[in-house]
Image (cartoon, rainbow, N blue to C red):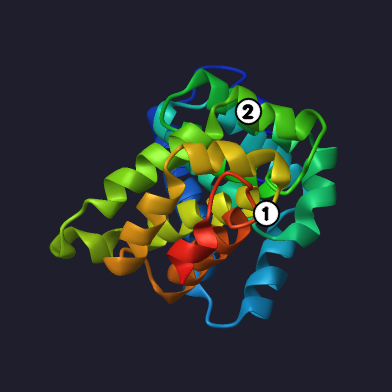
Amino acid sequence: VSSSSSSVYASAPSAEVEVLLGHVLSLLWNASDDVFFADATAWSRFTERLGQSDVVEALQGVLACGAPLQQQGAGAVLHNLACNRALHPILLECRVLESVTSVAQRGGEGAICCMLAAAEFAGSEETGPAMAALVRCDVVECLMRDLHLRALLSVEKRDSQFVGTRKLLSALECMASSDAHKASIAHAGAVDVLVRVINGRHADDRGLALAFCTLLHLSFEPTLGALHVCA
């Protein structure tokens, strides 16, 4: 993976290469997910070692040219890396934001992971091209639609979705911290959905904390009294 992915796709990859690439992406997806680290410092160290420019560029190559499931894996790894803010300078230098927003606009298997990555990059911004990219990709609408479906899950299915739900809540909380996104999040019905997530415990403790933080952010939106709901 650390070699240039353009060489991997210079000619049609063999079935063996396709299988190997799928396994490597799956390994990196899981290895870079903070859910498997009891120590946040250890996760930060690992992702900073993983997030070198050659690896990032290889992931971008898969994102651009890979099969749909490979694109999903590459997008998920880039999202995990984007969750570590110490890596933002190198990721932005490698133009990862442009890569993930391009895939998010096209749609497909990797779109939701790329939207999550874009939100981690630019969700807290008030202006600028990065913030505008989130608007173009309808990130708020997509996140709210997915979160609404998760809030309707039965207890039997709920627990298996905790990690994915927390990732959605993390991206939403990041965006809700920006005044530029508060109104669109509020108007998308976020309060009702977040209250349903909290009351139904559709996330782990970290996810529930993110849901509460999002409600607190939204309480500063003039058209919404989220603090009253929070109380």
Residue tagged 2: 135
Q: Which kind of residue does numbered mark 2 sit on?
A: Val
In the rendered image, is residue 54 in sight? yes
Residue under the point 54% across and 49% down: 224
Residue under the point 55% across and 59% down: 214
Q: Is residue 66 left or right of residue 178?
A: left
Residue under the point 51% across and 27% down: 66
Q: Which kind of residue does numbered mark 1 sit on?
A: Ser
Residue reaching furthest to the bottom:
39
Q: Is residue 199 left or right of residue 169?
A: left
Q: Nearer the viewer, residue 63 or 2?
A: 63
Residue tagged 1: 177
The image position of residue 129, as x and y in percent, is 79, 28
In the rendered image, is residue 74 in sight? no
Indicate the quadrant where residue 75 lies.
top right
Q: Is residue 191 left or right of residue 214?
A: left
Judged from the image, the secondary structure of the residue bearing numbered disc 2 is helix
The image position of residue 223, as x and y in percent, is 58, 44
Q: Are marks 1 and 2 in contact (CB under 8 Å)?
A: no
Sequence-first disc among 1 and 2: 2
